[in-house]
Amino acid sequence: MSEFRHETARLILRDWRGDDWAPFWEATNTPAVMRWLGGVCDADKREGAQQRLLSYKRDHGHTFWAIERGSDGAILGFCGLKRSNQQGGPLGMMEVGWRLREDAWGQGYAREAAAAALDLAFGRFDADEVIALTVARNEASWGLMKRLGMQRRSDLDFDNADFDPDDPTIIVYSISPEEWARVDA
């Protein structure tokens, strides 16, 4: 399988390299970043997450790719596509997701990366619909979903206490290729 690399105005979405993991975890495995993602990961959880990301690429041809800032090569987090695999959720649907380090928040990087991932989902990977998931209380995440033109799909919501034990509802947004074409125009 060939190496994946996709450039936007400021970012590079690309396959993971061995030397990406240390800066990725150092910058994103923090209480603030992991607040709605089940909390800070220990070594076993980090290794499991890495193996899942690599398996998505191997099994489906896409994953949550490393986000590299074009201007300085810094690893800002990840963004990309996978098949939804959350217990209780809409299994197998194409899912867009992102995680950025805290000092990259509020600069439009997540939107830029997610828009690129949606372009790829519909243009390269022929998705007929793309979903995004978050916990109900993660307003920043579902706010971005709305800004991307995604629509709330309460019919796909499900409970999973792994991410927010106080409110286990995972909410789902989705977008079709036709809806994305109108947003992206």
Image (spheres, grey):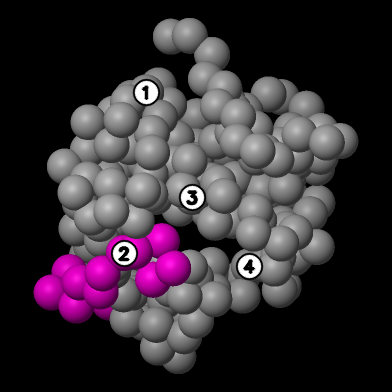
Residue 105 position by quadrant:
bottom right
Task: Identify residue for label 3.
Answer: 114
Tell me what residue is drawn at x 66 percent, y 48 percent: 77
**Along the viewing direction, whichever of 38 and 171 lies nearer the viewer:** 171
Separation of residues labelled 3 and 2 (CA atoms): 11 Å
Location of residue 75 with respect to 162 vertically, above or below: above
Query: In the rendering, at what x and y percent does residue 81 appear?
Result: 40, 41
**Under tag 3, what secondary structure?**
helix
Task: Identify residue for label 1.
Answer: 61
| Closer mark to the observer between disc 2 and disc 1 | 2
Task: Identify residue for label 2.
Answer: 150
Type of amino acid at the residue the image marks with label 1:
Gly
Which class describes the residues within 10 Å of circle 3: few (<14), some (14-19), or many (20+)?
A: many
Tell me which segment is drawn in magenta: 146-159
Residue sitting farthest toward the bottom = 166
Type of amino acid at the residue the image marks with label 2:
Met
**Under tag 4, what secondary structure?**
loop
**Along the viewing direction, whichever of 105 and 1 lies nearer the viewer:** 105
Residue sitting farthest toward the left = 155
Type of amino acid at the residue the image marks with label 4:
Met
Residues tagged 3 and 4 counted as in contact (Cβ below 8 A): no
Residue 124 position by quadrant:
top left
Disc marking residue 127: none
